[in-house]
Amino acid sequence: MSIGFGKFRIKNELVVIFLVAFILRVLFVIASNLLLPNAPLGMDYEYGVIARSVLEGYGYSAPVIQGFHIGEKAVETGVYRPTANQLPFFTLLLAGVYGIFPEHMAQWMMKLLQAGISALTCVLICLAARKVFSPWAGRIAGWGSVVFPGFIIGAARLTPEPFFTFFLIGGIYSLCLYREIPNWKLLVGAGLLFGITMLNSNVLIPILPVIGIWVFFWKGSIAGKMKVLGAVLGLIFLCVSPWLIRNYLIFQKFPMFKSTMGLNFYLGNHPEGTGTFYKANGEPIETLIPDTFKENFDISEVRQDDLLMKEAKVFIQENPSRFVQLFVDKLWYFTWFPPRQMLSREVVLYKKVFGFPYALLLISCLIGVYYGIRDKWLDTLFLVGVFISVAALYAIFIVGHQRYRMPVEPYLIMLAGYGLAELFRKRLPDIKEEKESSERK
């Protein structure tokens, strides 16, 4: 295959990127299901609980449980209560797949769908890096995302992150296109993609101000830029308003999209906490959940969550220095990895096998930031801002799973792609010529 980036050859390479990415993910899905049938990759967590409740006629609810203690098996009471524990997009999609396909096929089909979404994400990473930086940055970032372990593993895990990652970069790429060629269809597409993203994960919230600052520094009139932001925010609100109205009618208040904010804030800011799902001695952090929480399943989960939020606020008021220390620790854990005793067995293995390649990614990313600030300062700082905003959010709450980093890893890969493209530009004439040709256009 030619290394040129003529119009036809770009499309050719994008197809190859998609196919290779999809095949790798499908092979991993097959291998993980056959070789590790009881591993966490086969679980559907709270999403599956709510999906089955929907299919069984209980609505968007979850069963009240007993035995919510470490070492005890949780027992469903047969009583259901309305829930906002998880946002609706992924959960209802899971319910749809479970409802269409037989039980023995449903998870397979969902994971194949995620493999396709993850492969499309690789294509978007290639296109976005090419649009923001250079053709070779796009090529390196695209192929880097194809083989990036976190994306491959993520396709086999039944969680919202693959869709969050796809919709987020899709919205950002649409805005990049709109900036170059203003078109209302691109703007509507960006707003709807961000709206769907919000219905998939409320982690979009801290990214929105970063997007707003980025758009504010575009060329053009302030009025024009305000119209862009107004349209995007309006479409986001249009997408999420049914969910907000539903929650208000049920809980008589507006939880922050999900009813787990207090729980996560409490677990991430506790005298014995580490900011992860494990205590310093390796004991699961669930032991820190007070009995009052476990015994209050007769009230709404929003009120239940408020109790933990109040306790966490008291801790922070009385221990501000400990809060700051935990915040800094969690920033580091999000960017790198927590200590071994605070990792699950699967993440320990992941770190052993892929820790060094991930370190090279971070180093290449820093190189990309250096070159990017020199040549493309606005877009570079925007990508860095997206990562920092999400890292700061989890540092305030809790750094639980390695998969939480997935939605912002595309921007590390894009920066790394540009760093490598610039680093080797002078040594490889074809890359240099490619960049010069792009600049002339």
Image (tube, helix red, strand yellow):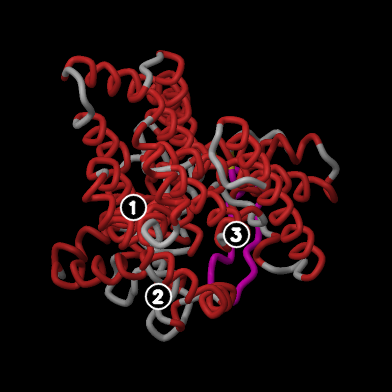
Q: Earlier in the sequence, mark 1 or mark 3?
A: 3
How crowded pointer 2 is (Cα within 10 Å; few <14, some 14-19, many 20+) is rated as many
The amino acid type of the residue labelled 3 equals Val
Q: Determine the image quadrant of residue 429.
A: bottom left
Q: Write down the residue under mark 1.
A: 387
Q: Write down the residue under mark 2.
A: 338
Q: Determine the image quadrant of residue 222.
A: top left
Residue bounds of the magenta highlight: 62-80
Q: Position of residue 113 (x, y in %)?
A: 70, 42
The amino acid type of the residue labelled 1 equals Phe
How crowded pointer 3 is (Cα within 10 Å; few <14, some 14-19, many 20+) is rated as some
Q: Write down the residue under mark 3.
A: 147
Q: Is residue 299 something one can see in this rendering?
A: no
Give me the C-alpha separation between circle 2 and circle 3: 24 Å
Q: Residue at x 49, y 52 (%)?
A: 141
Q: Are marks 2 and 1 in contact (CB under 8 Å)?
A: no
Depth order, front residue of 410/59: 410
Q: Position of residue 101 (x, y in %)?
A: 82, 39
Q: In the figure, is residue 270 to the left or right of 186?
A: left
Q: Residue at x 43, y 28 (%)?
A: 174
Q: Earlier in the sequence, mark 2 or mark 3?
A: 3
Q: Residue at x 52, y 48 (%)?
A: 139
- Name the residue at the bottom extreme: 281
Give me the C-alpha separation between circle 1 and circle 3: 21 Å
Q: In the figure, is residue 404 to the left or right of 57?
A: left
Residue 145 included in the magenta stretch of the image:
no
Depth order, front residue of 270/146: 146
